[in-house]
């Protein structure tokens, strides 16, 4: 499975964290890292978060980064905020 994703920047001053950006251009502009990756495995953390007024289960994914289009990763991977 190939998955393209962005990581929202915690440093973007003009948006709140966990705000959904419907435009791919906005997502790219406010992201520190833009990459494509292949998900290797997932697991539930057991945490439930409120997002857009609804409860969402939190999951963690381990992925192999295939391409970095913006920003830079580390030798041991890319980590979110």
Image (tube, helix red, strand yellow):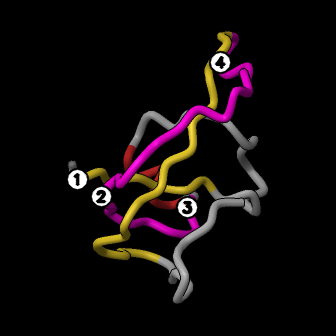
Q: Which residue is mark 3?
A: 31
Q: Are marks 2 and 1 in contact (CB under 8 Å)?
A: yes
Dot placed on the residue nearer the N-terminal end, 3 or 2: 3
Q: Which residue is mark 2?
A: 38
Q: Say which of marks 4 and 2 sits in front.
A: 2
Residue 60, position as x, y percentages in the image: 57, 44
Residue at the image position 43 percent from the left and 65 percent from the top: 34
Give the main secondary structure, helix, strand or loop, of the magenta stretch: strand
Is 59 on the left-hand or right-hand side of 51?
Answer: left
Snapshot quadrant of residue 69: bottom left
Q: Earlier in the sequence, mark 4 or mark 2?
A: 2
User: Within 10 Å of the Cα at label 1, are there few (<14), some (14-19), or many (20+) other Cα atoms?
Assistant: few
- Residue on which disc 1 sits: 2
Label 3 vs label 4: CA separation? 20 Å
Magenta region? 31-53
Verify whether residue 36 appears in magenta.
Answer: yes
């Amino acid at each position: 499975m190939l998955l393209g994703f962005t990581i929202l920047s915690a440093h973007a001053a003009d948006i709140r964290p966990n705000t959904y950006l419907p435009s791919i251009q906005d997502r790219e502009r406010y992201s520190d890292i833009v990459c494509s990756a292949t998900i290797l495995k997932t697991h539930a953390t057991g945490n439930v978060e409120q997002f857009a007024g609804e409860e969402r289960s939190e999951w963690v994914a381990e992925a192999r980064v295939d391409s970095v289009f913006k920003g830079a990763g580390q030798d041991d991977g890319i980590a979110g905020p």
